[in-house]
Amino acid sequence: MQNIYDVVVIGGGISSSTFIANILKQGFKGKIAVVEAGRGLGGRCSTRYHHKDKKLALNHGCPNFNIKNFQKDICLENFIEELLDKNLIKSLDNSIFEIDENYKFSRNYNNQFYFGDVYTSITNMSKLVENVIHLYNTKDQIDFYFETLINKLNFQSELWNVLSNKNKKIIGKFLVCSSNLLLHKRSLEILNVGEIPLRKAIIKKNNIKIDEIIKLCNNQEYIKRINFLMFTKKNYYLEGIFNKDIIHFIFNQKAEKDIGFERIIFQKQFDNSLGIVLHTRNMESIINKYEREDRDILYKYLLNKLNTFLIKNHIASKNLLLDDISRMNWRASQPIGEGIPERLQLCEECNIGFCGDWIQLEGYGSVYGAILSGLKLSNKFIEFY
Ligand SMILES: Cc1cc2nc3c(=O)[nH]c(=O)nc-3n(C[C@H](O)[C@H](O)[C@H](O)COP(=O)(O)OP(=O)(O)OC[C@H]3O[C@@H](n4cnc5c(N)ncnc54)[C@H](O)[C@@H]3O)c2cc1C
């Protein structure tokens, strides 16, 4: 007979991991299924490993997160304390430089990902998500289904049937959607379906909350980002104060327009090579132009720009010698537009909850908001269940 889970969670990012950690911490005894389209946990907080050596790793999506906690949410405060106490995250204090249009470096950064207290993982961002989900999973309550892309939902007789594009069926009493894909019109193309999956499961006018969440969700758009990942040859160091384990260079808007990079992030590797991630947001047309000719020409163009910046600003004394370079397209890196009001996070009548950085909370569109949404949903769920 088919297993019936108490909770099925779609998505294995930081919001759903936080949700799961917090319901287990509060004593939830049920069985949980985590269904994730990717090969592992992380979502947009994910890490890519070098194909030659898995010990070489780069955070190719989100590299850090920041917490301001204007509203003094005690749950959030305790959660961050716990991550610090358990040695899962560390502060990024003096590793960040903002660069203005005159190429002046300062530590007064004015960037949405760097205000307040800035943290990163002690290991890497995927591992952080993995560690969070297992914080209280001492009784093996979680089953994982990776490489499982859900494209159909069905809610009948108080049970959720969750179906993948390869016909894998998972059944649960309560469903959590940690991504808005299954509610959003972009699902039609991405999942190749004729109707938005949640709309098909709960038809219009059956539930006011579901109607509202689908309507609002479809006003949300996403910022696209293209990142380039590089590993240098061994024994490559940055100069002076820049010779650290992690260095973030953030370009202000005018400087970004000039150089084309949003951020350059360096991560020292165990073998004394350097991992580098170039974050870009508005380079699509340049990238497409060069790529039409040859991908190597694009890489050469980027490397030239990077070397010029590093040497001119005395960050490096010689050109980078690369061992590997690749790229990552983030078609949906960060939601923009109005977020989903917190009051819609839980729909008791349909046994469904929503979390993720697309909920309108402090830190909307970032890890901060994603964590907060997971904590808020877990508290609502425990009260309801
Ligand atoms: C390049 C980049 C840089 C960023 N930089 C920062 C930063 O510096 N600071 C910061 O705070 N934030 C940053 N962000 C944003 C941050 O990564 C996100 O806000 C955060 O990771 C969102 O977490 P989440 O759990 O809400 O969603 P996600 O991490 O997106 O998790 C959702 C998961 O659901 C899965 N999924 C979706 N649909 C389905 C389906 N139908 N079936 C199965 N699985 C499904 C996805 O594969 C995904 O793993 C950045 C993002 C990117 C891409």
Image (cartoon, helix red, strand yellow):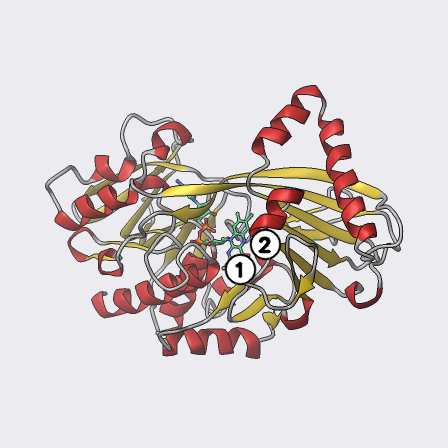
Residue 378, given in percent of the width and then of the height, sits at 33, 66
Q: How many marks?
A: 2
Picture quadrant where residue 183 is located:
top left
In the rendered image, the vertical position of residue 38 relative to residue 373, given as above or below? above
- Camera-nearest residue between 174 and 348: 348
Q: Residue furthest left?
A: 205
- Left or right of residue 272, residue 65 in this image: left
Q: Nearer the viewer, mark 1 or mark 2?
A: 2
- Camera-nearest residue between 72 and 102: 102
Q: Which mark is residue 111?
A: 1
Residue 327, given in percent of the width and then of the height, sits at 65, 38
- The amino acid at mark 1 is Asn
Q: Which mark is residue 284?
A: none
Mark 1 Cα shell of 10 Å, populated few (<14), some (14-19), many (≥20): few
- Left or right of residue 148, residue 234 in this image: right
Mark 2 Cα shell of 10 Å, populated few (<14), some (14-19), many (≥20): many
Residue at 79 percent of width and 68 percent of height: 241
- Camera-nearest residue between 135 and 345: 345
- Residue 181 visible from this viewpoint: yes
Residue at 81 percent of width and 51 percent of height: 312
Residue at 76 percent of width and 48 percent of height: 309
| Dot placed on the residue nearer the N-terminal end, 1 or 2 | 1
Residue 275, given in percent of the width and then of the height, sits at 74, 52
Q: CA distance from mark 1 to mark 2?
A: 8 Å
Tell whether label 2 touches label 1 (CB within 8 Å).
yes
Which residue in the protein does label 2 denote?
252
